[in-house]
Image: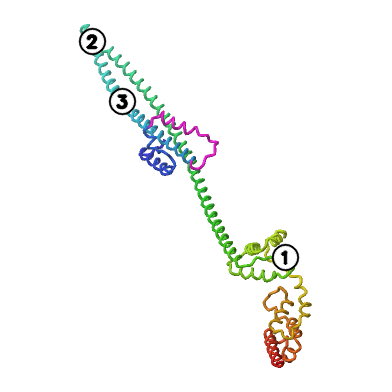
Amino acid sequence: MSRSSSPAAHWDHLEAWLSAMTDTVLPKDARDLQPLGREQLDAELDSLMAHDPTRSYNHKEWTKIIGSLAHNLVAQARKNEKSNLDLEQEAAALKLQAEEARRNQTKTQSQLDQLRLEAEEQRKEEDETDPEQKKEVERLQNALENLRRVTDQREQSERTAREELDEKLQQAESLLTRAETALKDRDAKARACEKHLNMARAEIHELIQHRDHLQYEIDTVHNELKHLDKLARNIPTFTPNPAGGHDVHAYLQDIDFHLHTVPNVTMRDRVYLLRITSSRDVRSFLDRQPETVKSDYLQLRQAFIREFSDPESEQGLIAAMDLKQARLEIPQAYYSRIRRAYFGARNKPGMEEDFNFKTLFLRNLHPTVSHHLGVLACPRSMTTQQLRDLAHKAFTKQKIASE
């Protein structure tokens, strides 16, 4: 199994990375877990694993749980690493002892062989010498056998210790492999949570921008409404009189004039100003209109004219034909009367240049004024103002002549 050349540096780097990622949300980091023992770490891990995985956690809670698990696993991995190092050192020491024992055994075996040869030689000599030497040879042979038994027992003990040590090393490596796998899984989940958290932050940022944009639009609409309310104070409330005498055209022209002072005016702004400058009865009339008409200022404008125009204005030509200038009436007063009779509530640019209106104005002048007017007055070639100026001069001549 591959390991870092410097395990302590490896774990320090991993703990520094985990601390940097979870420092802002975890109440404690690896430094608080390092002094804990194996049982305490297992208790910490059990408390973390007690969280319900089916429960919906927010990103901060997920980060706390996963970060704590990662720190706990790193602390356990540290202890496993230290335990493995201790086991490896112990195994190395046992291997050295075994090698030393083998060397001793070899040396002893050599000595035994030498002793055996010497003993055989001595036995041969003993056979030829005294019984005392024979006893010494037997004693040495017994000592040799005892030494062999001790050596065999020691070798068996060393083999057993080596096997136990190898088994412990395999268990430690298996535990470390599981810990590394679990840590990688937690790391992958942490990265997934981090990605999800970044996406959530991006969505929150977009929502904040959208909120700011909406707030800007609301402020803009609010300012526009304030401006419209301010304009409404300069527009008299439109209260039509069923008996006539109201001027819906003048009211609508007043609305259009003030709306020209509002930049980027919308259809909704026009309808709003129309509504807040109307009487209750007029607003009731607006509420009765179809939805397509309510939201369209141009259609509402036409509905206003049809509903509130002076019915007598449709008979303007007939009324104007019967209107004559009095003998002592000045042309300005006569012109005002015939203009109101002919056009009614209408008030459009250039409407007074209508040929029929100019013709009717000249024809209904008092005969004494027409007498001094002469043939110069021509409704086709002259403007209304020119005709009015001629009528004023003719009236002055008639007045001087009568005096």
In the displayed structure image, the side of residue 129 where residue 166 appears, left or right: right
Give the CA distance from mark 3 to mark 1.
Answer: 113 Å
Check whether the beta carbons of the residues at disc 3 and disc 2 lie within 8 A of each other. Answer: no
x%, y% of residue 61?
Answer: 49, 40
x%, y% of residue 384?
Answer: 69, 83
Classify mark 2: helix, strand or loop. Answer: helix
In the displayed structure, 122 sits above or below 213; it is above
For marks 3 and 2, give the one nearer the viewer: 3
Way the structure is coloured: rainbow
**Quadrant in which the N terminus is drawn:** top left
- Mark on residue 166? none
Write down the quadrant of residue 347 in the picture. Answer: bottom right
- Mark on residue 303? 1
In the displayed structure, 151 sits above or below 276; it is above
Give yes or no for residue 47 being in the magenta stretch.
yes
Name the residue beneath numbered marker 2. 136
Give the CA distance from mark 3 to mark 2.
Answer: 33 Å
Classify mark 3: helix, strand or loop. Answer: helix
**Quadrant in which the C terminus is drawn:** bottom right
Other-residue count near label 2 (Cα within 10 Å), few / some / many at <14 / 14–19 / ≥20: some
x%, y% of residue 232?
Answer: 61, 65
- The amino acid on which the numbered mark 1 sits, given as a three-letter code, is Ala
Residue at 29% over, 16% down: 147
Name the residue beneath numbered marker 3. 97
Magenta-drawn segment: 36-60
In the displayed structure, 157 sits above or below 212; it is above
Residue at 55% over, 54% down: 210
In the displayed structure, 28 sits above or below 153; it is below
